[in-house]
Amino acid sequence: MCVVPAGAEPTEFKENRIAMRDFLTRLGIEEMNPGASDGEWFGSGGELESFCPTAGERIAVVRQASADDYDRVVKRAGKAFETWRMTPAPARGEVIRQLGLAMRDHKKDLGMLVSYEMGKILSEGEGEIQEAIDIADFAVGLSRQLYGLTMHSERPGHRMYEQWHPLGIVGIVTAFNFPAAVWAWNAMIAAVCGDTMIWKPSSKTPLTAIAMQKIANRVFADNGHEGVMNLVVGRGSEVGERMLHDRNIPLISATGSCRMGRRIGEVVAGRLARSILELGGNNAIIVTADADPALVLPAVVFGAVGTAGQRCTSTRRLFVERSVFDRTAESLIKAYKSLTIGDPLDEKTHVGPLIDEGAVKEMEEAIAKAVEEGGEVLVGGKRCDRPGNFVEPTIIKAHKDMKIVRDETFAPILYLFEYGDLDEAIAMQNGVDQGLSSAIFTTNLLSAETFLSHRGSDCGIANVNIGTSGAEIGGAFGGEKDTGGGREAGSDSWKAYMRRQTCTLNWSRELPLAQGVHFDL
């Protein structure tokens, strides 16, 4: 069950905010809401506590799903698939249209819940729900565009074409930093493709998942399609491992660390199933001497400190051409000193807390390691002297021989490098194991095209004169190398959620055989 304990409201929150219990109640998060749903709510596993990172106080206790609960959800999802896959794709799109409208109705409360449970500032919390709404809109249009190709056959009187069929049950594993949007990127597309799904959210943000699932349950029930979208809140060692090994699930789409992704990739590949992996990002921006400073400053600051550096697309490394290095560093230091750190529900706040104590410790250890390797802290570098998991956004002057800069620390640490020529900068940017997002700021066409060419960025996302964060849902989202190679959201990413079938139809009265083989029959 999910119990919201009395007196759980953090004392550090601003006094004039909407009471926590009020917006949770409006979202249907009340007592006796277990952590598994296939249209009904149940749970027989252990208890999971949800904590507010702003003050470290407990928000709720969720009764998790057990292995038996998981099996029940899988059975229900499989049964729902039999009906949902036969529903015309435009009709599936109509249900998703209604789901998008329902999320619009609850956008403010959902955004507040994301901020409250995860810690990102309110504008980012509401922005995340808007992403979920946007991908629903995208999926509605997609439901009428699941196109297959036609091909000319070499055999007379034959027609060749390809068509796409629903894949089955899709497993969706999401991380704490985008507790609503990443589920939506997968779920909305999978739904219009005719799949059913089982969502395993991060154990650090279960309430957001429960709220989103409740909205989905109502919309699908109103349309007579229960069991299409399902939720399982449970331990990775119990529910997560069961999902990875489950031959009933032909696709696992997972967002998380590279370490987690390797485990998922190995297990899922071992049973010859598919995976979409969205893993770590050690993202970089290159600033050339001719770059427009008015564009550089807000892009770098937002990319490095947005969501307190807890985005997979957060800017972690900045390469600045030598002639403008000092000027750029001074501007960034000044900007960092002007940031407001505090209550994420306060509209004046720029930087909220890290997710938990472990994240604070990892940041402190990374800073210490950077200094040990010869880095210089230019600004920040400390934990804030106040309750909660607040830290100072940090800039560290770095050099290319530092080992720590090759790691992704999920915190607001920006490593600042000086470079001589563009080839050197591109080599340093590409010289890490991750390959998610990248950017260059330049007014030189040759530099921009070099960055986008075969010898330029090796990342899945490459931007010119915009930062590494803020990908649009219309484009395929994902990266290369240790980032996993998966793609979600726009473009033709829908194909990962379907199976391709090549069809040949003989409308003649002859049967020409392949390779010219002839039987005298």
Image (cartoon, rainbow, N blue to C red):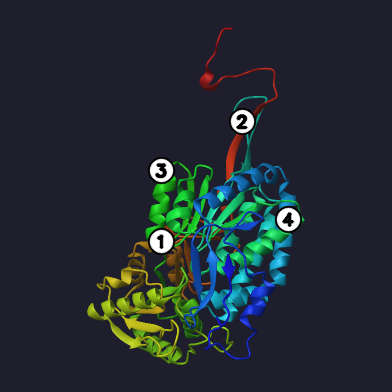
Residue 387 appears in which quarter of the rendering? bottom left
Q: Quick one: 387 or 148, which is closer to the camera?
A: 387
Q: Which structural element holds mark 2?
A: loop
Q: Farthest residue in the top direction? A: 521
Quick check: marks 2 and 3 in contact, CB under 8 Å?
no
**CA gap, disc 1 and disc 4:** 45 Å
The residue tagged 3 is 270
Q: Which structural element holds mark 4?
A: helix
The residue tagged 1 is 458
| Viewer can see residue 284 | yes
Sequence-first disc among 1 and 3: 3
Identity of the residue drawn at 58% across and 64% down = 1
Q: Amino acid at mark 2?
A: Ser
The residue tagged 2 is 153
Identity of the residue drawn at 38% across and 83% down = 394
The residue tagged 4 is 221
Above-or-below relation of 381 to 64 = below
**CA gap, disc 1 and disc 3:** 28 Å
**CA gap, disc 3 and disc 4:** 36 Å
Counting from the top left corner in percent of width and height, residue 338 is at 47, 92
Q: Amino acid at mark 1?
A: Asp
Quick check: marks 4 and 2 in contact, CB under 8 Å?
no
Sequence-first disc among 4 and 2: 2
Above-or-below relation of 79 to 512 = below
Residue 440 appears in which quarter of the rendering? bottom left
**CA gap, disc 4 and disc 2:** 45 Å
Q: Quick one: 471 or 37, which is closer to the camera?
A: 37
Counting from the top left corner in percent of width and height, residue 126 is at 62, 75
Q: Amino acid at mark 4?
A: Ala
Tell which tag, 2 or 3, sits nearer the viewer.
3
Identity of the residue drawn at 67% across and 69% down = 28
